[in-house]
Image (spheres, rainbow, N blue to C red):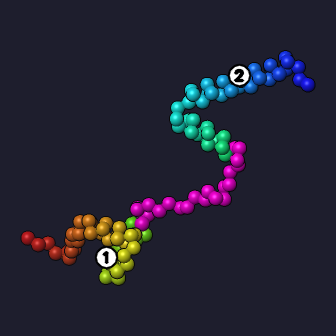
Amino acid sequence: MASFGSLKSAIFDREARKQQYQAHILGLNAYDRHKKFVKDYVSFYGSEESSHVKLPVKTDQDTLREGYRFIRSEEDDMDRSWEQRLVKRYYDKLFKEYPLQTGAIFL
């Protein structure tokens, strides 16, 4: 059986650790507290890296680079996916004035 002194010491140590932890948590802002809780959760339960596969991000600029055509045809307008609609909207907004260069000077 444990002596009264060791039992008292164990209880005191446990309460001191509890107070120190609470003081540390209360001293953090909401974001840092959230990061600490998530880090503690992952360290306790482990992390599964295979379930957190990041998919490649395709931005609007990438879509415009892939789908833009300087001269559009009727077939280009037939596809109604969101990418093609975005490209068509961009194409329609462009200022379309093409000078003809013939080499002649008109007065």
**Is residue 11 visible in this depiction of the protein?**
yes
The residue singled out by tag 2 in the image is 16
Q: Pointers 2 and 1 in contact (CB under 8 A)?
A: no
Horizontal and vertical percent position of residue 18:
68, 27
Horizontal and vertical percent position of residue 3:
88, 20
Above or below — where is 100 with respect to 21?
below
Q: Amino acid at mark 2?
A: Ala
The C terminus lies in which quarter of the figure?
A: bottom left
Which residue extends farthest top?
5
**Is residue 68 visible in this depiction of the protein?**
no
Quarter location, residue 61: bottom left
Q: Nearer the viewer, residue 26 or 99?
A: 26
- Looking at the rendering, the stretch of residues picked out in magenta corresponds to 43-63
Q: Secondary structure at mark 1?
A: loop
The residue singled out by tag 1 in the image is 71
Which residue extends farthest right?
1
Q: Residue at x 57, y 58 (%)?
A: 54
Above or below — where is 60 with respect to 33?
below
Binning the other alpha carbons within 10 Å of mark 1 as few (below 14), some (14 to 19) or many (20 upward) gives few
Disc number lying in front (2 or 1): 2
Q: Residue at x 26, y 66 (%)?
A: 94
